[in-house]
Image: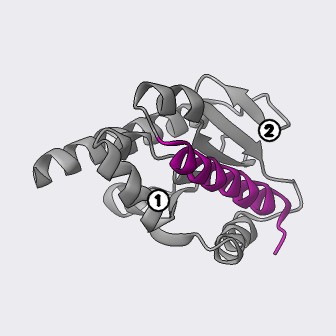
Amino acid sequence: MRRNFFAVLGVVLGSLVLSASAGWAAAPKEKQSTQGAGVYKVAIDPGVSLADAAESMRLRANVLNLKLVSELPLSKQVEAITNKPQRTVTIFQFCDAVTAKDLIEVNLDFAVYMPCRIALIEDAKGRGWLVMMDVNVDAIAKEKRLPQALKDRVNAVRNSLIEIMQAGAKGEL
């Protein structure tokens, strides 16, 4: 069972990384937040450094009572393996542990739907982006028969993640 969990986690994380790395080939054309194709993306303001965006996200998550449970400096790992400089790719995972546990108790499938990852990505032109999976909570809640109270909590977490991204993009504390 533990192997299955890590296999699913690997697939989800891999999908996010592949989606994120697609942005390495060329700078995205969007200048504003975009929704569609299962991705929510926000451009980091030109005057905000990637380090400041990351710190702003950490601070905003703390204010919103979401815990930073993982920070994967993917580009640093690739750099260590290849000995070649890489554009920044860091994956942050913020979590409301109780909501996550309650979702998994309703249905194990929810483990793959939790949109708690935000990728900070530097594109080919040096522009910073914040990207996360945009889950249609209503459709999944209906399909999986999620109780309304839990659906409301999931929407609150999703809204908090969007607020974290917006704070990071603007360098707000």
Residue 56 drawn at (x, y percent): 74, 71
Q: Residue 11's image quarter?
A: top left
Query: In the structure shown, which secondary structural element does the residue marked by tag 1 occupy?
Result: helix
Asked whether, in this view, residue 116 is left or right of residue 101, the answer is: right
Count neighbours of disc 1 (C-alpha within 10 A) and say few if under 14, some if 14 to 19, many if 20 or more.
some
Where 32 sits versus 60, above or below?
above
Q: Kindly check if marks 2 and 1 are in contact, taking CB atoms under 8 A apart as contact.
A: no
What secondary structure prevails in the magenta region? Answer: helix
Along the line of sight, the residue nearer the viewer: 108 or 167: 108
Query: Which of the two labelled residues, at mark 2 and mark 1, occupies the earlier sequence position?
Result: 2
Let me know if residue 120 appears in the view: no
Name the quadrant of the C terminus: bottom right
Q: Which residues are magenta?
A: 147-173
Asked whether, in this view, residue 132 is left or right of residue 172, the answer is: left
Instruction: Tell me the residue at 71%/77% (across/down).
Output: 63
Count neighbours of disc 2 (C-alpha within 10 A) and say few if under 14, some if 14 to 19, many if 20 or more.
some
Where 69 sits versus 164, above or below?
below
| Callout 1 amino acid | Thr
Q: Residue 170: say if magenta.
A: yes
Let me know if residue 165 appears in the view: yes
Where 39 sits versus 93, above or below?
above
Residue 4 drawn at (x, y percent): 15, 45
Along the line of sight, the residue nearer the viewer: 56 or 139: 139
Give the labeled residue for mark 1.
99
Instruction: Tell me the residue at 47%/57% (across/down).
Output: 75
Asked whether, in this view, residue 38 is left or right of residue 109, the answer is: right
Q: Residue 138's image quarter?
A: top right
Residue 68 drawn at (x, y percent): 52, 71
Give the labeled residue for mark 2.
33
How far apart in space, not on screen, are marks 2 and 1 (Cα)? 26 Å
Going by the picture, which residue comes out furthest to the right?
Answer: 47
